[in-house]
């Protein structure tokens, strides 16, 4: 029985992890810039720069995660975790949901942040900061859970 | 700001579109990694995955909302209300999945 992309799972996992770290740092920088905008700092260039970095890295990370998912499902979840660590299965499912919601928040915050004017009303700056901050928090949570599950049983290993 | 309002509406509909198909068991795209078959069904076997389909539902809902709001000529709603609604829906999703996690542990 061969599972889709099983042969290249370790490479895909490494790329997924590197993109994950990029997403964590880019979304954090974007959130900090958005919070600075609420106190009147001129951060339009940072919002544009970190906006495209955050959205590109999280979309790419999600795509690599989706490619890895069949191999995880068969070789890690059903072959190991469901019998030996069912709580970790639940934790990974929770991480997948957080990642999906983070994707929407980060892409939305990046799109909105690119157009935030220097003299934006306070309500708009605060809304952007909330959107971006929540997105970054979910990305951090998903990354930490992902690291925990990977430490337990990395996909691509027996 | 048109971009911010579009994003907030889009996030709201993404959150709804992500939560509802899974909880209400709407038919969705499924993939069986062992048989390597793709289907469109509400009944998913234990090994098959409906995550791709649920994500597609959510992306479609978010994109449709974005297109409609971007082209809308209706007077815009206050951005604070939109932000509150969007983040509340995201929080609802997180609370729902967290409750499932805690119930399963």
Image (spheres, coloured by chain):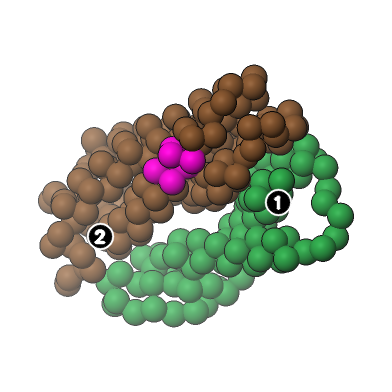
Quarter of the figure with residue B87: top right
Judged left or right of residue A38, residue A23 is: left
- Check disc 1 and report the residue beneath it: B2
B18 vs A61, nearest the viewer: A61
Q: Would you call the spot at circle 1 few (<14 residues within 10 Å), some (14-19), or many (20 or more)?
A: few
Q: Nearer the viewer, residue B83 or B73?
A: B73
Let me know if residue A15 appears in the view. yes
Q: Secondary structure at mark 2?
A: helix
Numbered badge on residue A9: none
Q: Nearer the viewer, mark 1 or mark 2?
A: 1
> In the image, residue A36 lies at what x, y percent?
57, 22
Which shade of the palette goes to chain A?
brown
- Which residue in the structure is indicated by mark 2? A71
Q: Give the residue drawn at x 54%, y 34%.
A: A44
Residue at far right of view = B75
- Foreground residue, A15 or B96? A15
In the rendered structure, which segment of residues is drawn in magenta?
A48-53
Measuring from the top left, give residue A98's x and y in whole percent: 49, 44
Q: Please say whether residue A83 is visible from this viewpoint.
A: no
User: Which chain is the one coloured green?
Assistant: B
In magenta stretch: residue A49: yes
Is residue B29 left or right of A15 when viewed as pictured? right
């Amino acid at each position: 029985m061969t599972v889709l992309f099983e042969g290249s799972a370790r490479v895909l996992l490494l790329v997924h992890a590197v993109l994950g770290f990029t997403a964590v740092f880019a979304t954090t920088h974007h959130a900090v810039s958005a919070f600075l905008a609420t106190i009147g700092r001129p951060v339009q260039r940072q919002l544009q720069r970190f906006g495209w970095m955050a959205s590109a890295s999280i979309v790419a990370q999600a795509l690599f995660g989706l490619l890895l998912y069949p191999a995880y499902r068969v070789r890690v979840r059903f072959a190991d975790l469901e019998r030996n660590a069912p709580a970790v299965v639940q934790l990974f499912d929770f991480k997948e949901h957080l990642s999906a919601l983070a994707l929407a928040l980060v892409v939305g915050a990046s799109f909105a942040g690119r157009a935030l004017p220097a003299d934006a009303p306070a309500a708009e700056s605060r809304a952007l900061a909330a959107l971006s901050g929540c997105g970054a928090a979910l990305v951090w949570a998903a990354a930490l859970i992902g690291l925990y599950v990977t430490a337990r049983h990395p996909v691509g290993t027996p | 700001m048109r971009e911010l309002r579009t994003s907030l509406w889009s996030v709201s509909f993404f959150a709804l579109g992500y939560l509802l198909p899974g909880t209400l068991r709407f038919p969705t795209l499924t993939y069986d990694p062992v048989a390597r078959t793709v289907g469109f069904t509400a009944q998913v076997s234990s090994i098959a995955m409906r995550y791709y389909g649920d994500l597609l539902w959510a992306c479609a809902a978010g994109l449709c909302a974005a297109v409609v709001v971007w082209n809308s000529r209706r007077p815009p709603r206050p951005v604070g209300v939109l932000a509150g609604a969007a983040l509340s829906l995201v929080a609802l999703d997180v609370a729902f999945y967290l409750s499932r996690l805690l119930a399963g542990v």
